[in-house]
Amino acid sequence: MIKDDKCIFCKIIEKSIPSKILFENDKNLAFLDIFPVSKGHTIVIPKNHYKNLEEIPNNALSELFEIVKKVSILIHKKLKVDGYNILQNNFRAAGQVVNHYHVHIIPRWNEDGKFKLYIPKKQAKEEELNQILRIIKE
Ligand code: 5GP
Ligand code: ZN
C-alpha cells in the first residue's frame, strides 16, 4: 500500500481516525463526509495514496469508479434521492483540500437549493473556441 503518514484519508483507511464506512474492499473505501453538502454525501477513495487524477493508475481508477457506481445506486435506492452529483476536485485552484484522490457522491433532491453548475449568459465566439482548440491540440 502507498501511504502518506500526514494524510487524513490514509488515517481513515488504517482506522486510526474513525469514519462512517458505507463500503470497503481490499482496494477502495467509501465513507460519509464529515461536512456534508447534503444528507448522505459520500467520499470514495482508493486505499493507495495517489494525490490526484493524474497520479492514479488507469486500472485503479476504473476499479474505483465501479465502487462509485455501486455506492451511488445504493444511495439512490436507500435514501430515495432524486439525483446526485459525482464531483472530483484536482489541485488547490479547483478546491482540492485533501491531497488523496477522492470522488464525492452528493445526493440531490428536487429544488433543494444547493449548487448548480454556473452557466454564463454570454455564449463564446467561434474564434475563441477555435483558438482554445488549437492550443490544446497542437
Ligand atoms: P476536497 O475539497 O478535497 O475535494 O474534499 C475533501 C472532503 O473531505 C471535504 O468535503 C471534507 O468535508 C471531507 N473531510 C475532510 N476531513 C474529513 C474527515 O476527517 N472525515 C471525513 N469523514 N471527511 C472529511
Ligand atoms: Zn492518503
Image (spheres, rainbow, N blue to C red):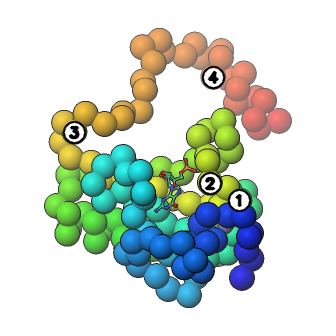
Single out the residue that lies furthest toward the right.
138
**x and y percentages locating residue 88 in the rendered image:** 54, 51
Q: Are marks 1 and 3 in contact (CB under 8 Å)?
A: no
- 4 or 2: tag closer to the N-terminus: 2
What's the distance in space between the residues labelled 1 and 2, CA to CA?
Answer: 8 Å
Mark 2: amino acid = Val
Badge 4 density bin: few <14, some 14–19, many ≥20, Cα 10 Å: few
Badge 2 or badge 3: first in the primary sequence: 2
Q: Quadrant of residue 33?
A: bottom left
Instruction: Classify mark 3: helix, strand or loop.
Output: loop
Q: Is mark 4 within 8 Å of ligand 1?
A: no
Q: Earlier in the sequence, mark 3 or mark 4?
A: 3
* Gap between marks 4 and 2 measured at Cα: 33 Å
Residue drawn at (68%, 44%), measured in percent from left and top?
91
Residue identifier under label 4: 129
Image location of residue 105, percent across then percent down: 40, 57
Does the beta carbon of the residue at mark 2 sit less than 8 Å from ligand 1?
A: yes
Q: x%, y% of residue 94?
A: 61, 38
Q: Earlier in the sequence, mark 1 or mark 2?
A: 1
Mark 1 belongs to which amino acid?
Lys
